[in-house]
Image (cartoon, rainbow, N blue to C red):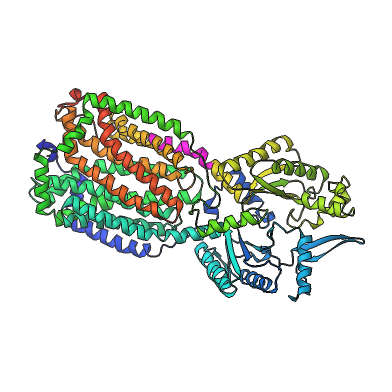
């Protein structure tokens, strides 16, 4: 066993280069840390509408191609102003609504040309008189707040067709539709465009609108929904990540002190890991990335991975220090022994992140790149800088004595765990694993793609945003979940009878599809106008075949066709954006389009927030299995290259497969769908989890080659590296499980899933790996042989 702990190989070129130039290594790391710390202080929360959507998906490409023709159907915010007592037809309410409308108009980022409320001149009423059609602005120029003008306003609203849209069905609230610009002119320099700052915009809505006007008028309550508000709330909630990071740091500090019994090594591990986090944040800013609601979790992951490798290094140095001449020799021996398995484990971590690049969603790609940068810097901070730092600081005598005692004394706990490698126990373990795999696969079929809740599932059900969303769903006929079908024709073709008839047929089909509230298009207006032109007779509420009549009837359908009458959107309002609702609606449109698309008439999906959700779900569904397969192929290839043994590869990879299957079953049981927020956990769990197996198997292989029987070799493995693996798994799980208490639901979901996967990967490496080795590894063939593993000396 001695020669295993003190390998007498000649130092490698890399080892000599690093340890012969220790002051230079520390100086370079210090200089880089200063520069990147300055860069890290410049990182700001940032995101954009386009980064959150799959730009290459056909639905999104159709939407982007026709975005200029889809007024108010892209990135919008809806502000509902509610009268707590009475209704909206009061002087005080209408004056408050006017002030809010004017205030919103001047907020930076608002597309002022598309702003719509009862005070907008574009919101008009129409009625049929004996002389023909009459109409005007809902709030006329003569409005003065008197009872007479309020009565006139009530009549105008009833004739405007806005009840259920801009005005609540119970007349107790009304909506201001606020379209947004992704980039807007800089007030100080009109030639310069500024990106929309979602957090700042959300704060302006709170301060300038909600707080200000609810304080001014106690009878008013304001409800705000929309993508920009949701993202702003997410960013605000994720600022709490700093608090969770602090909690995780303190937990890790206490556990490391208990594990190492050495202040110097604890400080060294935490310091080098924090340096890794600083480097990662600094490099993110250098490459032009900010922190969005998803990449804010990356520093946590880098900290977790850094602690994992740091603990292995400290454990190795403590073992070597018992017989080494000095701290430098112990650090060099540990570097020689653990650099390669650490490097392979880090590459496996990186593979998990890199595979996420196949998902064409900006936030996931930035998360993948940011995390890949982070694991790359761990090579320098935890695999190189940490041993160099310890070569100066050393390990406390108490820790060295404890390590020496641990190396020679009997460990009942490790002896008990070593029974996992015993023939009888191994058979039971494999059978239990197969049963768990079968159960996980069976229950995992209940796993859904996409959101499973109403409102914003990224936020808690009792959050202010979701309460506002529930209010709007309950009080308006047009929900906030809109699927837009784009009906494309040649110029001036949108008013043709064949086009309108097809739109009418699709509207009827969609309104009879479960999960659809209502559908609105220029046909809706056309039929109303034709009825009006025929003395309001209900028998005439249908499409005319006379082209002149049709042209006249759609002239009042503002916003429901473009300037050239070549594109007419059909707005389908859904009950919610649950995956099942979206699937039904999209499938119904696709079936209709398949039969009715022809030369000069196309039904294109999809715009609106529900269209974007549907496209995102499709991308996630296609990528989910691909990512999982890619991760496992890459991890298996790296294990094969490292150990040059199919048996070793299977021992390491199969416990990870079990964890993934059980993770899917847990998500199904907890009602967590596979979506942008949870899909990365699949790759991250496998990438981080493989570390345990690599470290354990590399030591197990060394003892087997020394001629020890499998169970005894596993016992020695547990004594040397098992403690570090068990500690790391528990430490990381405790740190990550603090996320479960986050106000942001998707962060809580990720915390739950990562806690489960970290613990199960650790348990799988300690329990299932030796059981599989009992059936796959032939110790007698390995004994006394140098072998062909990269770790063989």
Task: Pick whichever, 225 or 621, lies toward us.
Answer: 225
What x and y, as percent, mark residue 220? 61, 69
Dominant SS type (magenta): helix
- Residue 265 visible, this angle: yes
Could you tell whether 159 is left or right of 453 in the image?
A: right
Q: Nearer the viewer, residue 323 or 227?
A: 227
Compared with 2, 195 (above or below) is below
Give me the residue at 68% from left, 44% from top: 604
| 731 lies above or below 42 | above
Q: How many numbered discs sit on the rendered protein?
A: 0
* Residue 444 within the magenta-colored segment of the rendering: no
In the rendered structure, which segment of residues is drawn in magenta? 619-632
Screen quadrant of the N terminus: top left
Residue 351 placed where, x, y %?
38, 42
Q: Quadrant of residue 423?
A: top left
- Residue 718: image location, x then y, percent: 19, 38
The answer to if 628 sits in the magenta stretch is yes
């Amino acid at each position: 066993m001695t020669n295993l702990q003190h390998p007498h190989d000649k130092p490698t070129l890399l080892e000599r280069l690093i340890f012969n130039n220790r002051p230079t290594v520390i100086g370079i790391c210090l200089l880089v840390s200063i520069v990147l710390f300055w860069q890290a202080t410049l990182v700001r929360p940032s995101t954009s509408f386009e980064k959150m959507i799959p730009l290459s998906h056909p639905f999104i490409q159709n939407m982007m191609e026709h975005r200029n023709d889809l007024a108010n159907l892209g990135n919008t915010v809806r502000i509902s102003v509610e009268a707590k007592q009475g209704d909206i037809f009061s002087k005080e309410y209408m004056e408050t609504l006017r002030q809010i409308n004017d205030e919103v108009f001047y907020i930076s980022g608002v597309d002022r040309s598309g702003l719509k409320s009862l005070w907008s001149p574009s919101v008009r009423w129409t009625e049929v008189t004996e002389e023909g059609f009459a109409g005007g602005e809902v709030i006329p120029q003569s409005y003065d707040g008197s009872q007479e003008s309020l009565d006139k306003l009530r009549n105008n609203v009833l004739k405007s067709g806005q009840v259920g849209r801009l005005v609540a069905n119970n007349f107790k609230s009304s909506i201001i539709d606020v379209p947004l610009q992704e980039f807007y002119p800089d007030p100080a320099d009109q030639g310069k465009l500024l990106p929309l700052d979602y957090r700042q915009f959300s704060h302006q809505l709170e301060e300038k609108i909600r707080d200000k006007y609810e304080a001014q008028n106690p009878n008013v309550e304001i409800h705000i929904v929309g993508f920009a508000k949701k993202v702003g709330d997410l960013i605000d909630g994720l600022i709490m990540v700093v608090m969770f990071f602090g909690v995780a740091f303190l937990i890790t500090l206490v556990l490391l002190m208990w594990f190492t019994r050495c202040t110097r090594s604890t400080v060294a591990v935490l310091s080098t890991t924090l340096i890794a986090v600083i480097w990662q944040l600094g490099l993110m800013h250098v490459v032009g990335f900010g922190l969005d609601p998803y990449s804010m979790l990356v520093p946590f992951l880098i900290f977790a991975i850094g602690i994992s490798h740091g603990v292995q290094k400290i454990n190795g140095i403590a073992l070597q220090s018992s017989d080494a001449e000095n701290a430098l020799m112990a650090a060099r021996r540990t570097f020689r022994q653990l650099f390669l398995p650490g490097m392979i484990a880090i590459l496996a971590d990186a593979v998990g992140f890199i595979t996420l690049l196949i998902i064409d969603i900006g936030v996931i790609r930035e998360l993948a790149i940011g995390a890949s940068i982070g694991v790359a810097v761990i090579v320098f901070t935890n695999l190189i800088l940490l041993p160099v730092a310890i070569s100066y600081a050393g390990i406390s005598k108490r820790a060295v004595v404890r390590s020496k005692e641990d190396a020679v004394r009997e460990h009942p706990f490790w002896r008990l765990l070593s029974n996992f490698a015993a023939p009888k126990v191994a058979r039971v373990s494999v059978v239990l694993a197969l049963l768990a795999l079968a159960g996980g696969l069976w229950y995992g079929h209940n796993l859904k793609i996409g959101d499973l809740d109403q409102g914003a599932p990224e936020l808690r059900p009792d959050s202010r945003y979701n309460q506002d969303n529930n209010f709007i769903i309950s009080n308006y006929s047009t929900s906030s979940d809109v699927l837009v079908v784009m009906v494309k024709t040649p110029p001036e073709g949108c008013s043709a009878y064949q086009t309108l008839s097809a739109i009418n047929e699709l509207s009827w089909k969609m309104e009879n599809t479960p999960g659809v509230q209502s559908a609105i298009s220029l046909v809706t207006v056309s039929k109303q106008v034709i009825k009006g032109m025929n003395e309001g007779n209900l028998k005439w509420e249908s499409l005319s075949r006379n082209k002149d009549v049709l042209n006249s009837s759609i002239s009042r359908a503002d916003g429901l066709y473009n300037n050239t009458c070549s594109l007419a959107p059909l707005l389908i309002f859904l009950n919610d954006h649950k995956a099942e609702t979206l699937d039904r609606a999209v499938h119904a449109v696709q079936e209709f389009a398949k039969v009715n698309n022809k030369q000069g008439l196309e039904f294109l999906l999809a715009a609106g927030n529900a269209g974007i959700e549907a496209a995102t779900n499709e991308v996630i569904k296609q990528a989910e299995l691909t990512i999982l397969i890619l991760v496992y192929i890459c991890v298996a290839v790296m294990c094969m290259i490292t150990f040059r043994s199919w048996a070793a590869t299977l021992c390491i990879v199969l416990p990870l497969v079990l964890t993934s299957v059980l993770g899917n079953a847990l998500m199904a049981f907890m009602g967590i769908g596979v979506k942008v927020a949870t899909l990365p956990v699949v790759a991250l769990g496998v990438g981080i989890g493989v570390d345990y197996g690599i470290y354990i198997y590399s030591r197990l292989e060394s003892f087997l080659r020394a001629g020890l029987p499998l169970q005894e070799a596993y016992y020695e493995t547990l004594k040397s590296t098992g403690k570090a693996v068990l500690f790391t798994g528990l430490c990381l799980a405790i740190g990550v499980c603090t996320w479960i208490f986050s106000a942001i639901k998707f962060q809580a979901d990720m915390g739950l899933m990562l806690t489960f996967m970290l613990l199960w990967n650790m348990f799988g490496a300690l329990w299932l790996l030796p059981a599989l080795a009992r059936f796959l590894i032939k110790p007698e063939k390995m004994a006394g042989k140098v072998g062909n593993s990269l770790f063989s000396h």
